[in-house]
C-alpha cells in the first residue's frame, strides 16, 4: 500500500464509539457494572476520609443508572481525564475490592467486596491503584507501582479444567454450546423484573442441546450444565480439548435504548485475529496441536504463518455459519437488520475451532425478555439453531 493510501485510510477510517456504563448494581457482596460494549481494562483504588472506592475505566462514557446497597451508601459517576469514566462507591463501612472479573462477552465487570478493619482499609488506601485487564485470553491483575506500603491479596488458584460430558452417537461431528456468564457473574439484568442473562443463556443452551440430541445427527456438549462460573479462556479451551467442530456461545444482549430488539451473531474481527495469532506464536511452548499440526518443532516465522492460515480459515467458516444461522433461524426468531457483527471477544479466539457468539435478543427490551424466558421462545431458538448446525455439518460432509 502506498503512503497516499495509508493517509487516505487514516483520514477516512471510522471512529470507534466509546462504550457507555449501562447500569451499576450492588448484589450482596459484589458490585456488577454493565456496559453496552465490551471493555478490556479497569483500575481500582481506595480513598480514606471519607471512605470510598474508585473505579476508572478508560474509553468509557459514564451512565446514569445505579443502585446502592449493603456496604455501599451511594454510587456516583463522572468523567476523568476526558475519556475515562470514574465510578465512586461511597462506603458505609470499611470495605475493599478483593477480586474483579470480566464477563465472557466483556460487557460486565464484577467487583467482589470484603469487609475489613479500618486499619487494613487505611493501608490499602496508601498502597495505591490496582489494575485489572483482559490480557491475552485471561484476566490478570497487574502489579501496582512500588510504594512505601503494599497490600497483597491472595487469589484462589485456577481450578483444573474439567471436560463436560458429550451426548450423541459416536462418530458424529461435535458442537460445544457455551451458556454465557454464570455463578457470581449474572450478566445483563433486565430492567423489566430483574431477569438475569445467566439464567436465560443456560435455559437456551439446554434447549439447543436437547433438540440436537433428539435428532441424533450430531454430538453436543455444554460448557456448563448448571449455575457455575467458568473463566473466559476455559470456555473455548473446552471446545479445543474436546476437538470440537463448532463452538457457539449463547448470550442475551442489553442496551440503553429499550427499543433495541432482535438477535445478533458475532464473529472474530480481523484485528483481533491478527493480535491473537501474534500472541499464540510468541508463546514459549509451541507444542500445541493446531488442526492436527504440531508446532513444537517449527520456527517462530513458520509457526506464525501456520497459525495465521489456520485462524483465517477458521474465521471464514465462522462467518459462513453466522450467515447460515440467520437464514435458518430467522423464520422463528427476530433478528436485527445488521445481524452480523465483528468483535474482539475472548470466547471467539480459538484459532482452530469455528466460533460464533449468538446474542439471542435484548433483555432490556420487554418483548425480547419475555420471548427469551418463555418455553415457546426457547423452543424456537433451539429449532433454528439446530437446523443451522445440522445444515453446516451436512455441507462440510458433502464438500469432503
Image (spheres, rainbow, N blue to C red):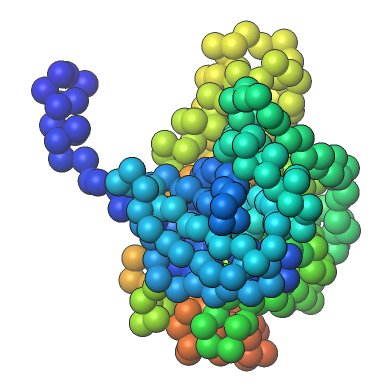
* In the image, farthest residue toward the front: 49
Q: How many labels, in total? A: 0
Q: Quadrant of the C terminus?
A: top right
* 335 or 110: nearer the viewer: 110
Say whether residue 200 is visible.
Answer: yes
Left or right of 15 in this view: 95:
right
Give above or below for 329 relative to 358: below
Give residue 103's position: percent from left, percent from top: 62, 56
* 78 or 294: nearer the viewer: 78
Give above or below for 373 relative to 217: below
Which residue appears at 69% of the width and 63% of the height? Answer: 93
Left or right of 112 in this view: 2:
left
Give residue 136's position: percent from left, percent from top: 60, 34
Give residue 68's position: percent from left, percent from top: 58, 73
Give above or below for 234 relative to 7: below
Left or right of 138 in this view: 223:
right
Give above or below for 331 relative to 316: below
Say whether residue 371 is visible.
Answer: no
* 393 or 197: nearer the viewer: 197
Q: Quadrant of residue 30?
A: bottom right
Which residue appears at 65% of the width and 67% of the height? Answer: 92
Give residue 131's position: percent from left, percent from top: 58, 38
Q: Quadrant of residue 248?
A: bottom right
Q: Quadrant of the N terminus?
A: top left
Left or right of 133 in this view: 220:
right
* 97 or 349: nearer the viewer: 97
Which residue appears at 79% of the width and 69% of the height? Answer: 227
Which residue appears at 42% of the width and 62% of the height? Answer: 77
Amino acid at each position: 500500500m502506498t503512503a497516499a493510501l495509508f493517509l487516505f485510510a487514516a483520514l477516512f477510517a471510522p471512529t470507534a464509539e466509546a462504550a457507555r456504563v449501562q447500569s451499576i448494581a450492588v448484589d450482596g457482596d459484589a458490585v456488577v457494572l454493565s456496559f453496552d460494549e465490551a471493555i478490556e481494562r479497569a483500575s481500582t483504588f481506595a480513598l480514606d476520609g471519607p471512605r470510598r472506592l474508585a473505579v476508572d475505566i478508560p474509553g468509557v462514557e459514564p451512565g446514569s443508572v445505579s443502585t446502592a446497597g449493603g456496604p455501599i451508601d451511594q454510587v456516583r459517576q463522572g468523567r476523568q481525564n476526558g475519556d475515562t469514566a470514574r465510578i465512586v462507591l461511597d462506603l458505609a463501612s470499611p470495605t475493599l475490592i478483593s477480586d474483579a472479573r470480566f464477563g465472557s462477552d466483556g460487557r460486565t465487570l464484577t467487583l467482589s467486596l470484603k469487609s475489613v478493619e479500618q486499619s487494613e482499609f487505611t493501608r490499602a488506601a496508601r498502597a495505591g491503584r490496582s489494575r485489572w485487564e483482559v490480557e491475552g485470553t485471561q484476566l490478570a491483575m497487574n502489579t501496582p507501582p512500588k510504594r512505601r506500603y503494599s497490600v497483597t491479596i491472595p487469589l484462589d488458584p485456577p481450578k483444573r479444567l474439567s471436560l463436560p460430558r458429550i451426548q450423541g452417537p459416536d462418530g458424529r461431528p461435535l458442537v460445544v454450546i457455551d451458556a454465557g456468564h454464570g455463578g457470581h457473574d449474572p450478566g445483563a439484568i433486565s430492567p423489566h423484573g430483574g431477569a438475569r442473562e445467566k439464567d436465560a443463556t443456560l435455559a437456551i443452551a439446554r434447549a439447543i442441546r436437547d433438540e440436537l440430541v433428539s435428532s441424533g445427527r450430531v454430538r453436543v456438549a455444554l460448557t456448563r450444565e448448571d449455575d457455575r462460573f467458568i473463566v473466559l479462556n476455559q470456555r473455548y479451551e473446552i471446545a479445543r480439548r474436546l476437538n470440537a467442530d463448532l463452538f457457539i456461545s449463547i448470550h442475551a444482549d442489553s442496551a440503553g435504548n429499550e427499543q433495541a430488539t432482535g438477535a445478533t451473531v458475532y464473529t472474530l474481527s480481523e484485528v483481533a485475529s491478527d493480535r491473537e495469532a501474534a500472541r499464540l506464536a510468541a508463546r514459549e511452548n509451541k507444542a500445541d496441536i493446531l488442526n492436527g499440526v504440531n508446532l513444537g518443532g517449527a520456527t517462530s516465522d513458520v509457526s506464525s504463518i501456520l497459525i495465521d492460515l489456520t485462524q483465517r480459515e477458521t474465521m471464514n467458516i465462522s462467518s459462513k455459519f453466522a450467515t447460515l444461522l440467520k437464514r435458518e433461524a430467522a423464520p422463528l426468531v427476530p433478528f436485527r437488520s445488521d445481524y452480523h457483527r465483528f468483535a474482539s471477544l475472548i470466547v471467539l479466539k480459538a484459532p482452530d475451532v469455528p466460533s460464533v457468539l449468538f446474542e439471542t435478543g435484548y433483555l432490556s427490551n420487554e418483548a425480547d425478555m419475555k420471548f427469551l424466558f418463555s418455553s415457546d421462545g426457547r423452543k424456537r431458538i433451539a429449532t433454528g439453531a439446530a437446523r443451522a448446525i445440522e445444515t453446516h455439518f451436512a455441507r462440510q460432509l458433502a464438500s469432503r
